[in-house]
């Protein structure tokens, strides 16, 4: 990954997180955390990974997809790039997976 991709990833993560906090989208009652952004090498697509506590992640994903045009418009207005990456939201289940593995490890008999 290039330095430019790293900078764009960081900027996308901060801007999208700020937009979600600012807009307070109706229906999102849980705590949404933007974990990372992964932009493609050609900077045309970006996947935004998020986790949520206190609400069904699929419901939050549906709400974010419904509001994606507003978020994309904010990015288009704020990013000084010739081509602004098109975003897509994805849930990140790594936290849930880590918790599941931790539970399994705690259930193992101690020897």
Image (cartoon, grey):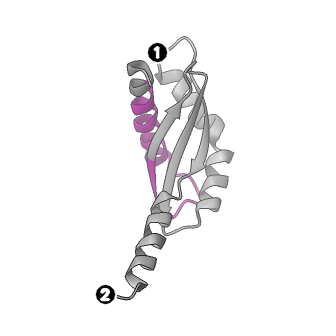
| Separation of marks 1 and 2 at Cα, in angstroms | 59 Å
Q: Position of residue 12 (x, y in %)?
A: 46, 32
Q: Nearer the viewer, residue 20 or 111?
A: 111
Tell me which residue sits at (58%, 61%) in the image.
57
Residue lying furthest front: 111
Tell me which residue sits at (54%, 11%) in the image.
82
Q: Where 54 sits versus 88, above or below?
A: below
Q: Which residues are magenta?
A: 8-34
Q: Is residue 28 left or right of residue 66?
A: left
Q: Nearer the viewer, residue 54 or 49?
A: 49
Instruction: Let me know if residue 30 appears in the view.
Output: no
Q: Nearer the viewer, residue 54 or 45?
A: 45
* Image quadrant assignment for residue 9: top left
Q: Is residue 82 left or right of residue 69?
A: left
Counting residues from the start of the chain, the first of labels 1 and 2 encountered is 1
Tell me which residue sits at (38%, 88%) in the image.
109
Q: Position of residue 96 (x, y in %)?
A: 49, 66
Q: Position of residue 89 (x, y in %)?
A: 60, 44
* Image quadrant assignment for residue 56: bottom right
**Residue 2 magenta-drawn?**
no
Which residue is under mark 2? 111
Residue lying furthest top: 82
Q: Where 14 sits versus 20, above or below?
A: above
Which residue is under mark 1? 80
Local SS, label 2: loop
Local SS, label 1: loop
Looking at the rendered image, the disc whose residue lies closer to the viewer, 1 or 2, is 2
**Residue 29 magenta-drawn?**
yes
Q: Quadrant of the N terminus?
A: top left
Q: Residues within 10 Å of mark 1 (few under 14, many from 20)?
A: few
Instruction: Let me know if residue 47 appears in the view.
Output: yes
């Amino acid at each position: 990954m290039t330095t430019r991709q790293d900078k764009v990833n960081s900027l996308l993560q901060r801007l999208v997180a700020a937009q979600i906090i600012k807009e307070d989208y109706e229906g999102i009652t849980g705590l949404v955390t933007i974990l990372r952004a992964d932009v493609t090498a050609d900077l045309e697509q970006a996947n935004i990974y998020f986790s949520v506590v206190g609400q069904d992640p699929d419901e939050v994903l549906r709400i974010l997809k419904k509001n994606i045009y507003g978020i994309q418009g904010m990015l288009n207005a704020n990013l000084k790039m010739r081509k602004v990456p098109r975003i897509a939201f994805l849930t990140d289940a790594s936290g849930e997976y880590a918790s599941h593995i931790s539970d399994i490890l705690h259930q193992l008999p101690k020897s």
